[in-house]
Image: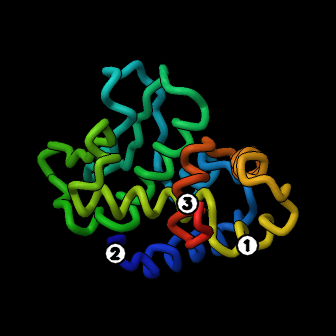
Amino acid sequence: MRPNFKYIEDKAEDVLSKNNLFKAGFSVEKLAKLLRISLKEEVLDDNVSGFFVMTDTDNIITYNKKDGELRQRFTIAHEIGHFLLHSKDQPIFIDKTPSVMFRDNSSSTGEDFKEREANAFAASLLMPKKLIEAEIEKAPNDVDDAIIFLAKKFKVSQQAMTFRLSNLGYGI
Protein backbone atom coordinates (compact mmCIF):
# COMPACT_ATOMS: atom_id res chain seq x y z
CA MET A 1 0.00 0.00 0.00
CA ARG A 2 1.29 3.45 -0.95
CA PRO A 3 1.79 5.83 1.97
CA ASN A 4 -0.01 9.18 1.94
CA PHE A 5 2.48 11.65 0.49
CA LYS A 6 0.13 14.67 0.39
CA TYR A 7 2.70 16.71 2.33
CA ILE A 8 5.15 15.98 -0.49
CA GLU A 9 2.62 17.01 -3.16
CA ASP A 10 2.10 20.25 -1.24
CA LYS A 11 5.85 20.86 -0.81
CA ALA A 12 6.53 20.29 -4.53
CA GLU A 13 3.68 22.59 -5.59
CA ASP A 14 4.84 25.23 -3.11
CA VAL A 15 8.46 25.24 -4.34
CA LEU A 16 7.31 25.47 -7.97
CA SER A 17 4.87 28.29 -7.24
CA LYS A 18 7.32 30.31 -5.14
CA ASN A 19 9.90 30.08 -7.92
CA ASN A 20 7.46 30.85 -10.78
CA LEU A 21 8.04 27.44 -12.34
CA PHE A 22 4.55 25.92 -12.01
CA LYS A 23 4.33 24.64 -15.58
CA ALA A 24 4.81 21.37 -17.41
CA GLY A 25 8.39 20.70 -18.50
CA PHE A 26 10.02 23.44 -16.40
CA SER A 27 13.81 23.57 -16.11
CA VAL A 28 15.08 21.56 -13.13
CA GLU A 29 18.46 23.21 -13.68
CA LYS A 30 16.87 26.62 -13.17
CA LEU A 31 15.13 25.42 -10.01
CA ALA A 32 18.42 24.05 -8.64
CA LYS A 33 20.07 27.40 -9.32
CA LEU A 34 17.24 29.29 -7.60
CA LEU A 35 17.61 26.98 -4.58
CA ARG A 36 21.38 27.62 -4.57
CA ILE A 37 22.26 24.05 -5.44
CA SER A 38 25.24 23.48 -7.72
CA LEU A 39 24.92 20.86 -10.45
CA LYS A 40 27.79 18.68 -11.64
CA GLU A 41 27.62 16.27 -14.54
CA GLU A 42 30.10 13.38 -14.18
CA VAL A 43 30.61 9.87 -15.45
CA LEU A 44 29.43 7.65 -12.59
CA ASP A 45 29.15 3.90 -12.16
CA ASP A 46 26.28 2.41 -14.15
CA ASN A 47 24.32 1.69 -10.97
CA VAL A 48 24.56 5.31 -9.69
CA SER A 49 22.28 7.93 -11.21
CA GLY A 50 23.38 10.73 -8.94
CA PHE A 51 24.00 11.95 -5.43
CA PHE A 52 23.55 14.96 -3.20
CA VAL A 53 26.42 16.33 -1.15
CA MET A 54 25.90 18.92 1.53
CA THR A 55 28.86 20.64 3.17
CA ASP A 56 29.12 23.65 5.42
CA THR A 57 29.58 25.87 2.35
CA ASP A 58 27.77 24.26 -0.58
CA ASN A 59 24.97 21.97 -1.76
CA ILE A 60 25.90 19.91 -4.80
CA ILE A 61 23.93 17.50 -6.95
CA THR A 62 26.10 15.30 -9.12
CA TYR A 63 24.30 13.33 -11.82
CA ASN A 64 25.42 10.66 -14.25
CA LYS A 65 26.58 12.07 -17.59
CA LYS A 66 25.88 8.66 -19.21
CA ASP A 67 22.17 8.74 -18.37
CA GLY A 68 19.63 10.09 -20.84
CA GLU A 69 18.16 13.57 -20.45
CA LEU A 70 14.87 12.34 -18.94
CA ARG A 71 16.67 10.19 -16.38
CA GLN A 72 18.93 13.12 -15.51
CA ARG A 73 15.87 15.35 -14.96
CA PHE A 74 14.32 12.81 -12.61
CA THR A 75 17.62 12.34 -10.76
CA ILE A 76 18.05 16.08 -10.24
CA ALA A 77 14.42 16.36 -9.04
CA HIS A 78 14.99 13.37 -6.72
CA GLU A 79 18.10 14.97 -5.22
CA ILE A 80 16.29 18.32 -4.84
CA GLY A 81 13.79 16.26 -2.84
CA HIS A 82 16.56 15.11 -0.52
CA PHE A 83 17.69 18.73 -0.15
CA LEU A 84 14.22 20.04 0.72
CA LEU A 85 12.95 17.07 2.73
CA HIS A 86 16.02 15.60 4.41
CA SER A 87 18.88 18.07 4.61
CA LYS A 88 17.87 19.06 8.14
CA ASP A 89 18.14 15.36 9.12
CA GLN A 90 21.76 15.21 8.03
CA PRO A 91 24.47 16.95 9.99
CA ILE A 92 26.47 19.63 8.23
CA PHE A 93 30.02 18.70 9.02
CA ILE A 94 32.21 21.65 9.89
CA ASP A 95 35.32 19.56 9.26
CA LYS A 96 34.46 19.56 5.54
CA THR A 97 33.39 15.91 5.64
CA PRO A 98 30.36 15.86 3.36
CA SER A 99 27.01 14.27 3.98
CA VAL A 100 26.11 12.22 0.92
CA MET A 101 22.80 10.77 -0.30
CA PHE A 102 22.97 8.50 -3.36
CA ARG A 103 20.37 7.73 -6.01
CA ASP A 104 21.21 4.28 -7.32
CA ASN A 105 19.43 1.12 -8.47
CA SER A 106 18.14 0.42 -4.96
CA SER A 107 16.50 3.87 -4.77
CA SER A 108 13.72 2.74 -7.07
CA THR A 109 12.89 -0.36 -4.99
CA GLY A 110 11.22 1.78 -2.35
CA GLU A 111 12.91 -0.06 0.51
CA ASP A 112 14.33 3.05 2.17
CA PHE A 113 11.67 5.54 3.33
CA LYS A 114 13.78 8.60 2.52
CA GLU A 115 14.33 7.24 -1.00
CA ARG A 116 10.60 6.67 -1.39
CA GLU A 117 9.96 10.24 -0.24
CA ALA A 118 12.56 11.61 -2.67
CA ASN A 119 11.04 9.58 -5.53
CA ALA A 120 7.54 10.81 -4.62
CA PHE A 121 8.87 14.38 -4.48
CA ALA A 122 10.52 14.05 -7.90
CA ALA A 123 7.28 12.71 -9.40
CA SER A 124 5.23 15.47 -7.74
CA LEU A 125 7.70 18.14 -8.82
CA LEU A 126 8.02 17.03 -12.44
CA MET A 127 4.37 15.99 -12.82
CA PRO A 128 2.26 18.12 -10.45
CA LYS A 129 -1.19 16.68 -9.81
CA LYS A 130 -2.99 19.92 -10.76
CA LEU A 131 -1.13 20.16 -14.06
CA ILE A 132 -1.73 16.47 -14.85
CA GLU A 133 -5.46 17.02 -14.25
CA ALA A 134 -5.46 19.98 -16.65
CA GLU A 135 -3.40 18.29 -19.37
CA ILE A 136 -5.18 14.93 -19.25
CA GLU A 137 -8.24 16.66 -20.72
CA LYS A 138 -6.16 17.47 -23.83
CA ALA A 139 -4.64 13.98 -24.10
CA PRO A 140 -5.73 11.43 -26.71
CA ASN A 141 -8.37 8.90 -25.62
CA ASP A 142 -6.12 5.90 -26.23
CA VAL A 143 -4.22 5.12 -23.00
CA ASP A 144 -0.86 4.47 -24.69
CA ASP A 145 -1.14 7.62 -26.80
CA ALA A 146 -2.17 9.62 -23.72
CA ILE A 147 0.92 8.40 -21.81
CA ILE A 148 3.17 9.34 -24.74
CA PHE A 149 1.50 12.78 -25.01
CA LEU A 150 1.77 13.51 -21.28
CA ALA A 151 5.34 12.17 -20.98
CA LYS A 152 6.48 14.52 -23.77
CA LYS A 153 4.59 17.46 -22.26
CA PHE A 154 6.15 16.97 -18.82
CA LYS A 155 9.57 15.87 -20.16
CA VAL A 156 9.58 12.56 -18.30
CA SER A 157 9.86 8.96 -19.39
CA GLN A 158 6.75 7.02 -20.34
CA GLN A 159 7.49 4.70 -17.41
CA ALA A 160 7.58 7.63 -14.96
CA MET A 161 4.31 8.99 -16.37
CA THR A 162 2.67 5.55 -16.13
CA PHE A 163 3.66 5.24 -12.45
CA ARG A 164 2.51 8.79 -11.73
CA LEU A 165 -0.90 8.30 -13.35
CA SER A 166 -1.33 5.01 -11.50
CA ASN A 167 -0.38 6.62 -8.19
CA LEU A 168 -2.87 9.42 -8.86
CA GLY A 169 -5.60 6.82 -9.27
CA TYR A 170 -6.07 6.86 -13.04
CA GLY A 171 -6.24 3.05 -13.20
CA ILE A 172 -3.35 2.64 -15.61
**Disc on the earlier residue, 1 or 3:** 1
Q: Is disc 1 surrounded by few (<14), some (14 to 19) or many (20+) residues within 10 Å? A: few
Q: Where in the figure is residue 125, as x and y percent of width and height?
A: 56, 62
Which of the labelled discs sits on residue 113, or is there none? none
What's the amino acid at mark 2?
Pro
Q: Which residue is mark 2?
A: 3
Q: Where in the figure is residue 58, as x and y percent of width and height?
A: 36, 48
Residue appearing at x 28%, y 42% in the figure: 102
**Residue 31 appears left or right of 91:** right
What's the amino acid at mark 1?
Glu
Residue appearing at x 74%, y 58% in the figure: 24
Residue appearing at x 26%, y 42% in the figure: 106
**Disc on the earlier residue, 1 or 2:** 2
**Residue 127 appears left or right of 58:** right
Q: Where in the figure is residue 2, as x and y percent of width and height?
A: 36, 71
**Residue 18 appears left or right of 133:** left
**Disc on the earlier residue, 3 or 2:** 2
Q: Which residue is mark 3?
A: 164
In terms of secondary structure, where does tag 1 sit?
helix
- Cα gap from disc 1 to disc 2, whole angstroms: 21 Å
The quadrant the N terminus occupies is bottom left
Q: Which residue is mark 1?
A: 133
Residue appearing at x 32%, y 31% in the figure: 48
